[in-house]
Image: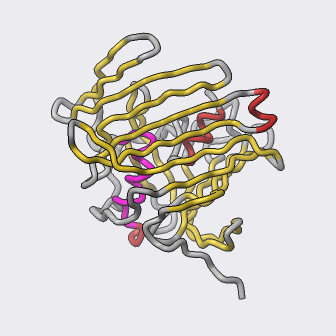
Amino acid sequence: MRLKTVLICSIFLLSNLIFSQTSPGNNSPFISSSFDSFKAGEWLKFRIHYGIFNASFATIDLKEGLINDKKVFKSTAIGRTTGIARIFFKVDDIYESYFDKTIVKPLKSKRNVYEGGYTKNVEIEYDYNNKIAIVNDIKYDTIKKITIKENVQDIISTFYFLRNHFDVNKLKINDFIRITMFFDADNYNFKMKFLGYEDVKTKFGIVNCYKFRPYIESGRIFRDSESLSLWVSNDKNKIPIKIEADLRIGSIEADLEGFKGLKFPFKIKINE
């Protein structure tokens, strides 16, 4: 388990370690056919910090791309350590996801990472007709075909899928959202609980948010299975505002640091 990977991917909703150990199921009563939360040109930046120390920055952007001469969305997520943290633990992670412009459904995924000497370079293509993912491990020059579950998402596409195909108006406190995620060469069941609404202080002002509790595997990194909290803006953009993770030693946070190209105005509450 690599904490850096967890945090970067958490921002992009929500990491290779956020694997549900509950009953399978990727259908949620909250999924809708809406498609209006983002547009090409969107760019988000997050600051990840441990106490007063900056650990890294992460960005995610959305552009138009091509897959087999078809126009699609292409999202690129980049995470890297900075400052003193980079001296002790250098991280350069790049994740890419290509998905259909009509419905968020991954067509191709890429992961090229360097984390303190650990490297991974994988490309995945999704064949929905045959219900398989073709996993090309470039580092080891191997290709595997893995059976995928229905409505599967990759790490990056999950970020956009939840924003667009998910009717927040039907959410009730303690409701669960469930999704199947495909990461590297496995299917994982992911769930998170809706906890309600909460105002969050940011560098931009007070932002009213949906608060969620993603369920994670406890172990040598996280204090317990409920150690992660996620706040998402309560507006039409539905972007992550803040993430907190309680570790076995201390805690770590990720905060929205910058944004541009949002489809809708960023809603900020004015303090009276």
Q: How far across and how far down the image is residue 43, in percent? A: 51, 55
Q: How far across and how far down the image is residue 39, in percent? A: 38, 60
Name the outermost residue toward the bottom: 272
Q: Quadrant of residue 96?
A: top left
Which range of residues does the magenta coloring cover? 153-167
User: In this orientation, which residue lies closer to the viewer: 211 or 55?
Assistant: 55
Q: Quadrant of the C terminus?
A: bottom right
Q: Residue sitting at 46 percent across and 48 percent down?
A: 191
Residue 258 in the image: above or below residue 184: below
User: In this orientation, which residue lies closer to the viewer: 57 or 31?
Assistant: 57
Q: Quadrant of residue 195?
A: bottom right
Residue 41 in the image: above or below residue 128: below
Q: Residue sitting at 33 percent across and 15 percent down?
A: 143
Q: Residue sitting at 29 percent across and 47 percent down?
A: 72
Q: Quadrant of the N terminus?
A: top right
Q: Residue sitting at 52 percent across and 70 percent down?
A: 234
Q: Main secondary structure of the magenta part?
A: helix
Magenta span includes 163? yes
Magenta span includes 110? no
User: In this orientation, which residue lies closer to the viewer: 133 or 168?
Assistant: 133
Decide if residue 225 is on the left or right side of residue 156: right
Name the outermost residue toward the right: 52
Tell me how many marks there are. 0
Decide if residue 248 is on the left or right side of residue 158: right
- Which colour scheme appears in the figure? secondary structure
Q: Quadrant of residue 79?
A: top right
Q: How far across and how far down the image is residue 24, in percent? A: 37, 40
Q: How far across and how far down the image is residue 178, in percent? A: 41, 49
